[in-house]
Image (cartoon, helix red, strand yellow):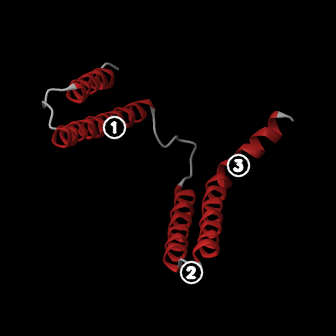
């Protein structure tokens, strides 16, 4: 394959890959609906209709994105990617620490043990460890 053919295929794949992903999602929704129909005996129209609406909305958004893009500028640079990574890292840390805290509270009330137990120490360790990892870059 020459460089010229590779660039041609790259532009074709860049353009059609999102539509392929959307079509695969729709196929999954249809197959899941039919499997639910075969196992439960009732067709889930709400799931099918929601999937169809989501597919249409995603297709419209993708068409608009491709019509508006005129140059070869990337959608995000390194700073944006780094900030998004930090945001997701902080969200994950917050969720995980809240989960462990809630689990320790539930464990405390169910077993009638002291609040300062292993889950609380684990909560603090994970929260501080991930917080340091998120802000160290």
Q: Quadrant of the C terminus?
A: top left
> Which residue: 13% across, 31% down?
115
N-terminal-most mark, 3 or 2: 3
The residue beneath circle 1 is: 92
Q: Which quadrant of the figure has residue 88?
A: top left
> Please, what secondary structure does the residue beneath circle 3 have?
helix
Q: How many angstroms separate mark 3 from mark 2 (CA)?
A: 39 Å
Q: Nearer the viewer, residue 25 or 72?
A: 25
Q: Characterize the local packing of mark 2: few (<14), some (14-19) or many (20 or more) Cα atoms within 10 angstroms.
A: few
> Please, what secondary structure does the residue beneath circle 2 have?
loop
N-terminal-most mark, 3 or 1: 3
> Which residue: 14% across, 37% down?
112
Q: Characterize the local packing of mark 3: few (<14), some (14-19) or many (20 or more) Cα atoms within 10 angstroms.
A: few
Q: Is residue 47 above or below residue 18?
A: below
Q: Is residue 108 left or right of residue 122?
A: left
Q: Nearer the viewer, mark 1 or mark 2?
A: 2
Percent from the top left, x then y, of residue 68? 52, 58
The residue beneath circle 3 is: 13
N-terminal-most mark, 1 or 2: 2
Q: Characterize the local packing of mark 1: few (<14), some (14-19) or many (20 or more) Cα atoms within 10 angstroms.
A: some
Q: Is residue 64 left or right of residue 80?
A: right
Q: Nearer the viewer, residue 129 or 37?
A: 37
Percent from the top left, x then y, of residue 47? 51, 72
Marks 1,2: beta carbons within 8 A = no
Q: Which mark is residue 42?
A: 2
Q: Is residue 52 above or below residue 92?
A: below
Q: Is residue 84 left or right of residue 33?
A: left
Q: How many angstroms separate mark 3 from mark 1 (CA)?
A: 32 Å
């Amino acid at each position: 394959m020459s460089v010229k053919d590779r660039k041609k295929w790259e532009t074709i794949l860049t353009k059609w890959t999102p539509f392929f992903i959307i079509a695969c999602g729709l196929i999954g929704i249809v197959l899941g609906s039919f499997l639910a129909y075969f196992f439960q005996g009732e067709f889930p129209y709400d799931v099918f209709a929601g999937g169809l609406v989501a597919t249409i909305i995603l297709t419209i958004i993708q068409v608009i994105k491709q019509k508006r893009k005129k140059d070869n500028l990337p959608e995000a640079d390194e700073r944006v990617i780094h900030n998004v990574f930090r945001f997701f890292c902080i969200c994950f840390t917050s969720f995980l620490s809240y989960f462990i805290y809630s689990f320790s509270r539930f464990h405390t009330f169910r077993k009638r043990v002291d609040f300062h137990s292993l889950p609380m120490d684990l909560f603090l360790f994970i929260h501080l460890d991930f917080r340091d990892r998120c802000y160290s870059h």
